Amino acid sequence: MGRLLHHFVVDVDPRRLFPAIGRLRCAMPHSTIAAFTHRGRVRPDNEDALAVDGRIFTGDMAAPVVMTQSSDCGLLIIADGMGGHAHGAMASRAVLDYLVAAVDRLSNPASCAEAIEEANQHLYALMQEHPEALGMGSTLVGAVLTAERLVTFNVGDSRCYLFSAGQLVQLSHDDVPEGENSHFGPRRSHALTQALGGSSFPIAVEPHISVDPPLAPGETLLLCSDGLTDMVTSQVISDTLKTAKDPLQAAKTLAARAFGAGARDNLSLLVARCLDAPDLQRKEFG
């Protein structure tokens, strides 16, 4: 993560509603999820944190872990901390602790932004308690998967992608200065136009929230920090999600490509794929 610019210009992020006709829905959001977080090859510590439902992962994973999600409401979040190791890690963990407990509000588009702003204010309250952590902050990207809809949200430059029908679509909005957006390699700087915290005085955030139809069987959702997108192009991400047989293979391949390119920043990713009927049978009766 880099520095936070103290002028906030947030463009309206148009909602993407994919055609529902002809798409088979999951009766419940049965998904296979692969999770991975690591400090990378350059940074001494990992300031990222990620959450799958109520489980929070920090530190360095030796390999991606795989979970099957079959609840009525599935939660995926990545927080990329900033402010130096101790403070960046504190910020990302605090954001996840707060939002994991607020999953019901995050799943409701009407209350999602309010819950995220409360997490933002929670960071500023922690700074008052810990003056040495003044200015700590975190980006945020998340998704709530239900049988009725897919709610995605973000603040900062961590991203959410949907891979559907052979196409990679970015559902998140990058909070970066104009002209700094890149799908073809590292940005020139890591300046952000907004993040949770990241300032010595409280500043409200304007989260980007999108509501789309629920994942259909075979569709894949990718959440990641800029430690992936700075190292791996969108085309490589698309090709990987297209050819990977399952989320574990996708996560391993994407992590390997990031490490092969230098892994100059902390790297975190979550890959979720909605299971079709044969996959469900294999999982349940295997």
Image (tube, grey):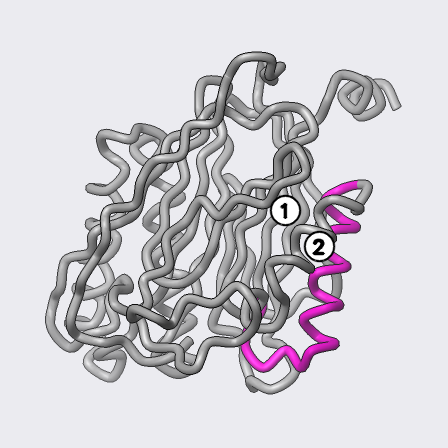
Image quarter in which the N terminus is found: bottom left
Say which amino acid is labelled 1. Answer: Val
Looking at the image, do the residues carrying marks 1 and 2 touch, with CB atoms under 8 Å apart? yes
Quadrant in which residue 6 is drawn: bottom left
Pick whichever, 57 or 80, lies toward us: 80
In the image, residue 79 sits, relative to residue 146, either above or below, namely below
Name the residue type under label 2.
Answer: Ala
Q: Is residue 254 magenta?
A: yes
Q: What residue would you read off at disc 2? A: 251
**Horizontal and vertical percent for residue 106?**
33, 36
Task: Report the residue at 44% width, 60% height from top.
Answer: 158
Q: Tell me the chief SS of the magenta region.
A: helix
Stretch in magenta: 246-267
Q: Earlier in the sequence, mark 1 or mark 2?
A: 2
How far apart marks 1 and 2 lie (CA) works out to 7 Å
Q: Which residue is mark 1?
A: 271
Image location (x, y in percent) of residue 129: 18, 71
Q: Which mark is residue 203?
A: none
Picture quarter containing residue 15?
Answer: top left
In this rendering, the answer to whether 62 lies above or below 167 is below
- The answer to which of 239 and 117 lies nearer the viewer is 239
Residue 268's x, y, as percent?
57, 62
Which quadrant, please, contains the C terminus?
A: top right
Q: Secondary structure at mark 1?
A: strand
**Could you say where residue 145 lies in the image, as x and y percent from the top left?**
49, 30
Task: Please tell me whether residue 234 is drawn above or below residue 102 in the rendered image.
Answer: below
Residue drawn at 28 percent across, 37 percent down: 112
* Residue extending farthest right: 286
Is residue 60 covered in magenta?
Answer: no
SS for callout 2:
helix
